[in-house]
Amino acid sequence: MATTDSQQIKVWDTGVRLFHWSLAGAFFIAYISEDDWPLTHLYSGYLIGILLLLRLIWGFSGSRHARFRDFVYTPSTIIGYLKQAIRLRAPRHLGHNPAGGAMVLLLIAVLSITVISGIALYGIVDFSGPLAGLMRGEQAADVVEAIHETGANLTLLLIAVHLLGVAHSSIEHHENLVKSMITGLKRSN
């Protein structure tokens, strides 16, 4: 599809975009509903878990830029990219850049820990869910709750860093990455 500035090409498939925005919404709902709406918190947590499982599958079977092999980089490559980004000299990537790829993996890992600990906590406190009866006692509940809350708060921190990275890369490369995650399109050059 031609535009007045340059050619646009499809980078983010529908699955990636639906995952991204559904995960953002489900996390927001889970985070704000924790104290006042426990069932909403529970169901949004289960939704996050389902989304993560689907993203793992899509990471191996999805389109080119959805696949992990397209954006998993070595630590030295990630550090080198970040050094270049600080100097506003980072190369533009059509898919995830090395920092963005690392963020995807970090978010998947931390959210997975948060979901699993949430399901475990539900099993301990309410003796319900798929992990019911696996652990018992107040001490176990306290430890699992601490893991769950730390995971949720670490996710918030990662989201903030992610948003800063998106803003930085959008400015550095003169492209609206938020719009790209809505439309799926990016500038081809």
Image (spheres, grey):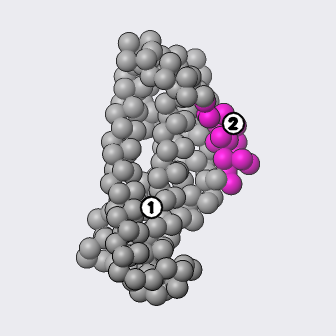
Would residue 122 be visible to someone looking at this image?
A: yes
Tell me the kind of residue under disc 1. Answer: Thr
Which residue, as the protein is rendered here, is positioned at the far left? Answer: 36
Q: Position of residue 169 (x, y in %)?
A: 42, 25
- Identify residue for label 2: 69
Quadrant of the drawing holding the C terminus: top right
> Of marks 2 and 1, which one's residue comes earlier in the chain?
2
Residue nearer the viewer, 33 or 139? 139
Q: Quadrant of residue 185?
A: top right
In the image, what residue occupies the spot 72% across and 47% down? 60
Tell me the kind of residue under disc 2. Answer: Arg
In the image, what residue occupies the spot 61% across and 53% down? 55
Q: Secondary structure at mark 2?
A: helix
Residue nearer the viewer, 95 or 154? 154
Decide whether residue 170 is among the magenta residues: no
Q: Secondary structure at mark 1?
A: helix
Q: Quadrant of residue 139?
A: bottom left
Q: Position of residue 38 (x, y in %)?
A: 34, 78
- Identify residue for label 1: 114
Residues rendered magenta in the picture: 57-73
Query: From the viewer's perspective, is 14 left or right of 23?
Result: right
Q: For the residues carrying marks 2 and 1, which lies nearer the camera in this image?
A: 1
In the image, what residue occupies the spot 50% across and 18% down? 80
Query: From the viewer's perspective, is 41 left or right of 105?
Result: left
Q: Position of residue 27 (x, y in %)?
A: 40, 59
Q: Are marks 2 and 1 in contact (CB under 8 Å)?
A: no
Decide whether residue 62 is among the magenta residues: yes
Question: Which SS type dominates the magenta stretch?
Answer: helix
Q: Quadrant of residue 163?
A: top left
Q: Position of residue 30 (x, y in %)?
A: 37, 66
